[in-house]
Image (cartoon, grey):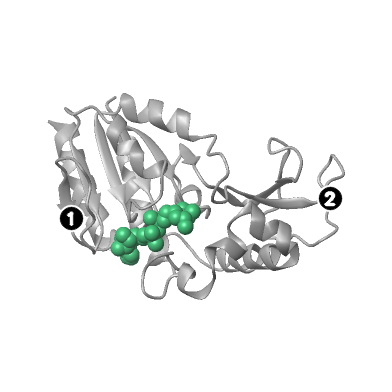
Amino acid sequence: MKKIVVLTGAGISAESGISTFRDSDGLWEQYRVEDVATPEGYAKDKALVLDFYNQRRRQLATVKPNEGHRQLVRLEEFYDVQIVTQNVDNLHEQAGSKNVLHLHGELTKARSERDSNLIVDIGYSDIHLGDKAPDGTQLRPHIVWFGEAVPNIEPAAQLCEVCDYFIVVGTSMNVYPAAGLIHYVPRTSPCYLVDPKAVTVSRNITVIQEKAGTGVKKVVDELIELAKK
Ligand code: APR
């Protein structure tokens, strides 16, 4: 089977009711990144940061995948599909995508403050000061904060190097190293981008300037037609 890598960002979850970061009503309009998404912010006010992610986790428990997530699952009958997401929600998994690689962590997981590999599933529960990881240290969100390492970027780049098609959905391509993945895609592999806004990328790409809920289906229909030939 031919391989497809799908790079997704906050935009694919927007129609599920989850705010993006840099749109006009985005999260970074309401919070300062340095306060809630950096190790320094966490060190300064752990309770504030824990509450920020507790609120996002509680919201995640109330939302569902949208048509954009669901359409990507259709591809799996015809292609080897690998989702590489910047999102920390679990909507791709809820929709039924089998292979999901999270670059920036997962809301439903927490980890030891000391050992980033000591990860526990917490579902949609809150994390409070005093909640301990198995190694006795404070539990923190299993989220990659700005300035922290992105351990999954290596496997993600390796997947991009061998993909036959690359689809970008709902990301402003503002944040590295995620935005740099497109440069690992072979020049001969067709690329598609689904976003209601114009997003600049430095290679030829087929743009569907629509929301994920309608635009992803257009790419999926085209690729399924190709697979049937
Ligand atoms: N369908 C598709 N795309 C949409 C939709 C929609 N309904 N609504 C908005 N978008 C697009 C926006 O036009 C924008 O290009 O989604 C993109 C969202 O961009 P950002 O808010 O910057 O989110 P993202 O690219 O995922 O941010 C990357 O930055 O703050 C960090 O760790 C955080 O993972 C995040 C990373």
Q: Circle 2 sits in a helix, a strand or a loop, which is it?
A: loop
Residue 208 bears which disc, if any? Answer: 1
Tell me which residue sits at (18%, 35%) in the image: 190
| 90 or 158: nearer the viewer | 158
Is residue 126 visible in this depiction of the protein? no
Residue at the image position 57 percent from the left and 61 percent from the top? 34
Residue 109 horizontal side relative to residue 92, left or right: right
Amino acid under disc 1 = Ile
SS category of the residue bearing label 1? strand
Q: Is residue 158 visible?
A: yes
Which of labels 1 and 2 is toward the front? 2
**Residue 8 shown left or right of residue 202 in the figure:** right
Res 159 → quadrant = top left
Left or right of 15, for residue 59: right
Res 77 quadrant in image:
top left
- Residue position for label 2: 132
111 vs 59, nearest the viewer: 111
Instruction: Give the vertical position of 149 relative to 185 (above or below).
Output: below
* Residue occupying image coordinates x 74% and y 62%: 46
| Percent coordinates x, y for residue 87 in the rendering | 47, 52
Q: Position of residue 70 (x, y in %)?
A: 37, 53
Residue 1 rendering spot, x and y as whole percentages: 29, 24
- Which badge, 1 or 2, is on the more N-terminal residue? 2
Picture coordinates of residue 200, whole percent (x, y):
22, 52
Identified by mark 2, the residue type is Lys
Label 1 vs label 2: CA separation? 46 Å
Q: Quadrant of the C terminus?
A: top left
Tell me what residue is drawn at x 23 percent, y 27 percent.
186
